[in-house]
């Protein structure tokens, strides 16, 4: 048990130091980072950071294997973390705590080791409409492998699993029920007790994805009575690359190993059947992430006493932050919350009328505010809500009211920026042709900019120059796969073999990037298009680190499509 004091708590996170009072300086520049992307990953306290370093500096050795002191010390610290996790989630035995890479791998282990071996054609797997892809795709894969079917639990208007539908959807055909304890988009604490009880009543196995719950709720897997509970350390102030699969011992005993290798065996022979190690090691093939496991222990040492505090200081502070932020957002006329009502934890999803979520998030970034935009790895939920993405603010107990004030202030400033003024979804007729800048024009323009903030502004301004495509031109043939905000590209070739590209996106930032890309490729032959060294060009523009191929704005997907269309 530990009394929560914001100052003391926040002080432990080096990345947040000197940032307790964010503000704009006299030039309008931010002087702090406001980190509101905690549902993606939390910052790390000094003790977690030190603990990894201490292991590497003072007792780096492999665990379980050697008969020397270093290895004993490492093994002791490593297994101590397992005991800490056992206590943290109220598991019956340390044999029920399996180290994995994270929640994703934990789910995949259950799916491939248990579900794949037990599901028969026509059996049903029940998921919930707001699941993270990590708790959808592994089940889709196993459904394909076995002929099982997936059924979906719908949500109420407030974004909870609709318990009135449990009896219809979870039936004698159901073999597995998997859902999130807390949605990573809606911030709703799902009624998992009811879901687990219903699954049990039909003999189905329940798996609860606790990735978003462990930093906010005290978890008791025995009281929940779920069959499996999964989570990642990095969302609860611990290191990345380490997570937990909790499973009831009887299930883990019955499941075959997920991977083979060292550590997970008892005996190996070319002449007799190989035998496997006992739990939990049967599921821990190869050398584990020892440093991360040990450091994870430190994050549990930090968090567990706050979660156990009967005065609930930590919890109450998180609620205060949530209320303050939600009420402040609600006062902005353009804010639309994506479901009804205030969330249960500090995860608030919304859109801003007239502005694409990527434009908002990238603009807030120039104020030093880190929030997430996009589908949040919950594309089926976005489809269900009829949106292609949204903004998500996710708070942690080290955040402050001053940071929320600054964030709200930044949104209001963004809404007043002339270059970002609201626009109709598809304006047409104002501009009739794609701007004819070439690479030299763009390089000259960017040479005058200083830093990402002013480059971002130029890109947004360029975005205004790109004529919008007619609705009919935005179709399945022109859509660019891999671009996180929707984008469409079409091409024409004249009788001299020169290509000209036109494109559109709902995000102004993407349209600006399209103008930059077109400057490199338009009015060129296929050969010249393939000769362009786009990486050099982006590097010269200082854009490289902003163009991540998978998670970012997908500009490299646009380049790939251009090269594909311009066949030599
Ligand atoms: N489940 C939920 C609800 C999540 O929010 C996340 C990550 O955001 C995951 C699963 C996957 O976690 P990881 O990427 O750490 O495996």
Image (tube, helix red, strand yellow):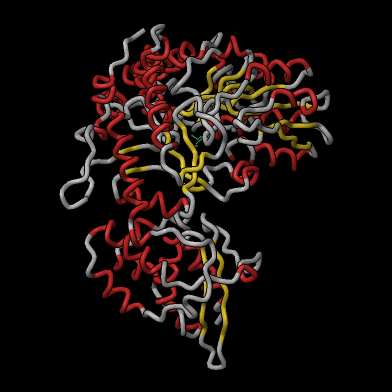
Between 410 and 163, the one lying in front of the other is 410
**Residue 322, x across and y down, in percent:** 41, 27
**Residue 78, x across and y down, in percent:** 40, 20
Above or below: residue 191 compared with residue 28: above
Q: Please identify the quadrant where the C terminus is shown.
A: bottom right
Which residue occupies 71% across, 38% down? 142
Which residue occupies 40% across, 38% down? 37
Above or below: residue 216 compared with residue 365: above
Quarter occupied by residue 180: top right
Direction from residue 487 to residue 154 in the image, left or right: right
Direction from residue 41 to residue 400 in the image, left or right: left
**Residue 354, x across and y down, in percent:** 48, 54
Above or below: residue 492 compared with residue 181: below
**Residue 44, x across and y down, in percent:** 32, 30
Direction from residue 373 to residue 56 in the image, left or right: left
Between 92 and 363, the one lying in front of the other is 363
Q: Please identify the quadrant where the N terminus is shown.
A: top left
Number of callouts: 0
Q: Is residue 264 visible?
A: no
Q: Is residue 386 visible?
A: yes
Quarter occupied by residue 192: top right
Between 398 and 349, the one lying in front of the other is 349
Between 545 and 472, the one lying in front of the other is 472
Quarter occupied by residue 398: top left
Which residue occupies 49% across, 33% down? 101
């Amino acid at each position: 048990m530990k009394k929560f004091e914001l100052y003391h708590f926040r002080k432990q996170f080096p990345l947040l130091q000197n940032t307790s009072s964010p503000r704009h300086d006299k030039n309008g520049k931010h002087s702090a980072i406001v980190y509101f992307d905690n549902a993606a990953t939390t910052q790390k306290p000094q003790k977690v950071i030190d603990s990894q370093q201490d292991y590497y500096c003072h007792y780096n050795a492999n665990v379980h294997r050697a008969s020397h002191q270093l290895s004993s010390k490492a093994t002791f610290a490593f297994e101590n973390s397992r005991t800490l996790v056992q206590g943290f989630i109220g598991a019956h035995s340390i044999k029920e705590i399996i180290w994995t890479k994270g929640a994703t791998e934990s789910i995949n282990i259950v799916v491939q080791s248990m579900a794949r071996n037990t599901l028969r054609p026509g059996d049903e797997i029940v998921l919930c409409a707001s699941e993270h892809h990590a708790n959808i795709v592994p089940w889709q894969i196993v459904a394909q492998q076995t002929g099982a079917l997936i059924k979906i639990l719908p949500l109420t208007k407030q974004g909870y699993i609709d318990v009135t539908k449990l009896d219809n959807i979870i039936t004698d055909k159901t073999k597995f029920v998997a859902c999130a304890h807390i949605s990573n988009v809606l911030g709703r604490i799902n009624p998992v007790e009811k879901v687990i009880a219903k699954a049990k009543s039909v003999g189905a196995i329940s798996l609860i994805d606790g990735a978003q719950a462990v930093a906010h709720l005290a978890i008791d897997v025995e009281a929940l009575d779920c069959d499996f509970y999964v989570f990642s350390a990095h969302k609860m102030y611990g290191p990345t690359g380490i997570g937990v699969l909790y499973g009831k011992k009887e299930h883990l005993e019955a499941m075959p190993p997920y991977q083979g290798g060292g550590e997970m065996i008892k005996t190996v022979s070319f002449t007799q059947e190989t035998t496997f190690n006992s739990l939990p090691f049967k599921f821990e093939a190869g050398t584990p992430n020892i440093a991360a496991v040990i450091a994870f222990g430190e994050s549990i040492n930090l968090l567990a006493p706050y979660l156990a505090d009967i005065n609930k200081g930590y919890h109450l502070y998180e609620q205060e932050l949530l209320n303050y932020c939600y009420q402040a957002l609600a006062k902005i006329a353009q804010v639309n919350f994506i479901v009804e009502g205030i969330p249960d934890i500090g995860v608030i999803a919304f859109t801003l009328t007239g502005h694409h979520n990527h434009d908002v998030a990238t603009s807030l970034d120039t104020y030093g505010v880190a929030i997430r935009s996009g589908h949040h790895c919950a594309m089926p939920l976005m489809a269900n809500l009829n949106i292609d993405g949204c903004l998500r603010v996710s708070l942690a107990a080290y955040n402050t009211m001053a940071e929320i004030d600054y964030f709200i202030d930044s949104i209001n400033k963004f809404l007043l920026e002339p270059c970002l003024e609201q626009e109709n979804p598809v304006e047409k007729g104002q501009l009739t042709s794609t701007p004819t800048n070439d690479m030299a024009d763009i390089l000259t323009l960017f040479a005058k900019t200083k830093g990402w903030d002013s480059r971002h502004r130029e890109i947004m301004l360029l975005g205004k120059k790109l004529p919008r495509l007619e609705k009919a031109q935005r179709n399945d043939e022109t859509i660019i796969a891999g671009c996180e905000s929707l984008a469409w590209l079409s091409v024409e070739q004249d009788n001299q073999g020169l290509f000209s590209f036109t494109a559109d996106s709902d995000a102004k930032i993407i349209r600006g990037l399209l103008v930059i890309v077109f400057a490199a490729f338009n009015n060129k032959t296929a050969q010249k298009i393939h000769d362009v060294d786009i990486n050099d060009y982006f590097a010269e523009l200082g854009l490289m680190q902003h163009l991540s191929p998978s998670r970012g704005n997908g500009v490299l997907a646009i380049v790939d499509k251009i090269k594909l269309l311009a066949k030599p």
